[in-house]
């Protein structure tokens, strides 16, 4: 059992993963990142899990990399940092990932939230990349994913000043899809995950992959990928079932084939 995560499988098709280092506002140390990467790898293979919701506490989603752990690492330590492999593993997760963010999502915490496909934020959430205040810069995708999510000017402002933005601003710039009262953030994220979990799994997987392609490829290649994925889905049982169910005015029963 993981030490730094709480796992809740009580919602059908969904695994709710809660970061749990309350004494340090869920600071991301090697252990937590390793346990999260391992848990996502396990959920990747678990057919009963259709989508994952990732959350923290009411005060903090995560306040960034564990600064005490960082203080123990010199340049060589950073070069061989085991957390890099964890981040890579987390970024490969192919099922839908919804983040429910309350409180601080700073540094690595903001970068972790940006690994999610959808971010739902409590109205008191704060997103920031304060690494510049420590004489460093974001190192887990904070310059690349943030710029793609919020555009150049806001990404520059956040990374170069280190000042966080509030949930409303995060929604205006497109980092967050919905804002809720903090007590409902997880509930809303679970609802969204459940809505996705009811869809055809292969269509969900390929649609996610295709949308992510748009972040790192040119339009022509992205369109080629989309056409290919669309064609692959044409041969699935779930496409036949979806169309039949519509015409027979009933709910579809998707099997993932
Ligand atoms: N690492 C380790 N410990 C942390 C931490 C972190 N990132 N953030 C908070 N804590 C600890 C505090 O040291 C404190 O511990 P003690 O009770 O033992 O003193 C406890 O959590 C509670 O924090 P505060 O008392 O500071 O709470 P606050 O409400 O006054 O302030 C805060 C909250 C503004 C988030 C403040 O804690 C803070 O600025 N934290 C650091 C944020 C930061 O700089 N993150 C970026 C880290 S670098 C990074 O993330 C790089 C990367 O991934 C690649």
Image: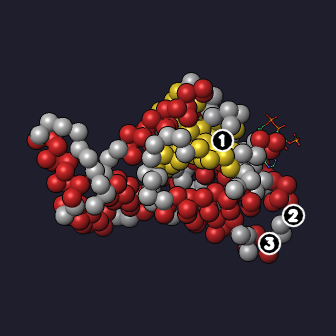
For residue 72, the mark is: 2
Locate residue 238: give its quadrant: bottom left
Q: Quadrant of the C terminus?
A: bottom left
Are the two marked residues, 3 and 2, in contact with CB atoms closer than 8 angstroms? yes
Q: Residues within 10 Å of mark 3 (few under 14, many from 20)?
A: few
Is residue 130 in view from this perspective? Answer: no
x 15%, y 41%: residue: 246
Q: CA distance from mark 1 to mark 2?
A: 25 Å
The residue at which mark 1 appears reads as 56
* Horizontal side, residue 48 vs residue 36: left or right: left
Residue 184: % across, % down: 55, 27
Taking the spot 18% from the left edge, 37% from the top edge, the residue there is 250
The mark that comes first in sequence, 3 or 2, is 2
Residue linked to disc 3: 77
27 vs 86: above or below: above
- What colour scheme governs how the chains and residues are painted in the rendered image of this protein? secondary structure
Q: Position of residue 65 (x, y in %)?
A: 73, 54
| Residue ID at (60%, 27%) | 182
Image point (59%, 44%), residue name? 8
On the image, the x and y values in percent for residue 138 come to 66, 56
| Residue 213: x %, y % from top left | 38, 61
Q: Are marks 1 and 2 in contact (CB under 8 Å)?
A: no
Residue 144 occupies quadrant: bottom right
Q: CA distance from mark 1 to mark 3?
A: 28 Å
């Amino acid at each position: 059992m993981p030490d730094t995560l709480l796992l809740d499988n009580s919602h059908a098709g969904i695994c709710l993963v809660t970061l749990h280092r309350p004494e340090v506002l869920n600071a991301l140390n090697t252990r937590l990142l390793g346990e999260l990467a391992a848990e996502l790898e396990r959920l990747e293979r678990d057919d009963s899990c259709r989508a994952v919701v990732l959350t923290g506490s009411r005060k903090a989603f995560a306040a960034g990399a564990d600064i005490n752990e960082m203080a123990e690492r010199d340049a060589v330590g950073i070069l061989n940092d085991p957390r890099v492999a964890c981040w890579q593993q987390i970024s490969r997760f192919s099922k839908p990932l919804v983040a429910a963010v309350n409180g601080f999502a700073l540094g690595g915490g903001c970068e972790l939230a940006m690994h999610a496909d959808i971010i739902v934020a409590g109205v008191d959430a704060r997103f920031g990349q304060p690494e510049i205040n420590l004489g460093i810069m974001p190192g887990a995708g904070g310059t690349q994913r943030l710029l793609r999510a919020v555009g150049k000017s806001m990404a520059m402002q956040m990374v170069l000043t280190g000042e966080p933005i509030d949930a409303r601003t995060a929604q205006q710039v497109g980092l967050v899809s919905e804002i809720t009262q903090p007590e409902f953030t997880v509930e809303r994220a679970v609802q969204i995950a459940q809505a996705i979990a009811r869809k055809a799994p292969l269509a969900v997987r390929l649609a996610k992959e295709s949308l992510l392609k748009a972040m790192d490829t040119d339009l022509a290649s992205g369109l080629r990928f989309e056409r290919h994925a669309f064609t692959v889905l044409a041969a699935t049982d779930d496409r036949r079932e979806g169309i039949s169910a519509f015409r027979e005015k009933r709910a579809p029963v998707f099997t993932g084939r």
